[in-house]
Image: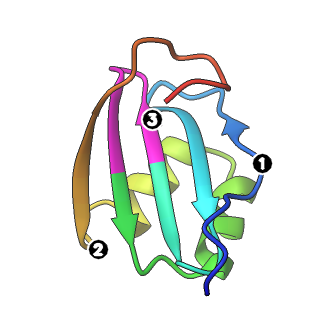
Amino acid sequence: MKNRFPMPRVAHQSSVLAATDYFPNLQTLDVVFTSGDVYRYLKVPLSLYRDLLEADSTGTFFNAHIRNQFPFQYIGRSNALSTDAV
């Protein structure tokens, strides 16, 4: 059975991304946007997620390399934009 637990949540200092959760064995990236909307991006390689974390601008990197590049699902809205709530 695949591990469904994410790597530790990462909060972002970005005008686009509030936080991300990555599930390495599922290659799934959950993104909490600053608007509160939460989306799940599928088939995102771990190497690309690491590149996102190292980017000078996570919002710019996300828009260029992840948004519209991978299948996604709308999850809902987050009531809190803290690093421990989705």
Residue 37 falls inside the magenta stretch: yes
- Seen at 71% across and 55% down, the residue is 53
CA distance separating discs 1 and 2: 24 Å
Q: Residues within 10 Å of mark 3 (few under 14, many from 20)?
A: many
Is the stretch drawn in magenta largely helix, strand or loop?
strand
- Seen at 61% across and 60% down, the residue is 22
Sequence-first disc among 3 and 1: 1
- Residue 20, quarter of the rendered image: top right
Give the SS element for disc 2: loop
- Give the image location of residue 14, x and y in percent: 56, 29
Q: Nearer the viewer, residue 44 or 69?
A: 44
Residue 6 in the figure: left or right of residue 14: right
Query: For mark 3, what is the residue?
Result: 32
Query: For mark 1, what is the residue?
Result: 8
Q: Nearer the viewer, residue 45 or 26?
A: 26
- Give the image location of residue 86, x and y in percent: 49, 30
- Seen at 61% across and 87% down, the residue is 1
Q: Amino acid at mark 3?
A: Val
Q: Nearer the viewer, residue 52 or 7?
A: 7
> Mark 1 and 2 residues: CB-CB less than 8 Å, in contact?
no
Query: For mark 2, what is the residue?
Result: 69
- Give the image location of residue 21, x and y in percent: 60, 50
Q: Amino acid at mark 2?
A: Gln
> Mark 3 and 1 residues: CB-CB less than 8 Å, in contact?
no
CA distance separating discs 3 and 1: 14 Å
Q: Amino acid at mark 1?
A: Pro
> Where 4 sits versus 78, above or below?
below
Magenta residue span: 31-39
